[in-house]
Image (spheres, grey):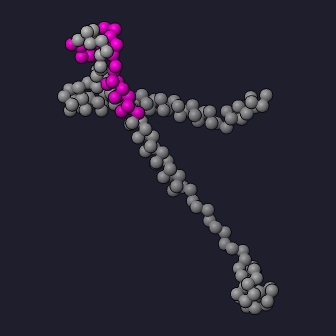
Amino acid sequence: MGLLKEFKEFAARGNVIDMAVGVIIGGAFGKVISVCVADVIMPPIGKALGNANFSDLFYSLDPQKTAGITSLAKARETGAAIIAYGSFINAVLDFMIVAFCIFIMLKAINTLKKQFDKPPVEAAPANKDCPRCLMSVPVKATRCGHCTSDI
């Protein structure tokens, strides 16, 4: 029964809901970045590199089956064993962009936290030392209670 009670407390604190929202938003953000990389970023890079379509880049392990084929979809239709390294390049680029965006967001959040978090104000000392006898007396005192000298 202890484990069930601990889980209920954990779920009631809102951590599970916060985590679920984060996963959902992260998934949607990942899809947006994937489309951006595949349809916006990679075509100009491919054009600059001689009309290369990165999503169609592959290495055939069965060159007889894929002779003359330049499309990844057509190479897969032949049933040949292929290494689709163009898809890997797109996935790495997706990851790098998502990681950079998360880094920028965390940096902005940490900057905002620093602006709103005020350093603790140190309390003024309640006592001071008498210059004659070096005993501790209240700050507002004008005469030492130990040696009766003026402060």
Residue 65 screen position, x and y as percent: 27, 8
Q: Nearer the viewer, residue 24 or 3?
A: 3
Q: Quadrant of residue 146?
A: bottom right
Is 30 left or right of 3, judged from the image as shown? left
Note whether residue 77 is visible.
no
Residue most toward the left? 50
Residue drawn where x is 57% and y is 31% of the image = 20
The C terminus lies in quadrant: bottom right
Give yes or no for residue 75 being in the magenta stretch: yes
The N terminus lies in quadrant: top right
Q: Is residue 63 above or below residue 39?
A: above
Q: Main secondary structure of the magenta part?
A: helix
Residue 62 screen position, x and y as percent: 30, 12
Residue most toward the bottom? 149
Q: Which residues are magenta?
A: 68-95
Residue drawn where x is 72% and y is 74% of the image = 126
Residue drawn where x is 79% and y is 89% of the image = 147
Q: Nearer the viewer, residue 40 or 90?
A: 90
Q: Quadrant of residue 16?
A: top right
Give yes or no for residue 105 being in the magenta stretch: no
Residue drawn where x is 47% and y is 29% of the image = 27
Is 105 left or right of 70, judged from the image as shown? right
Q: Quadrant of residue 48?
A: top left
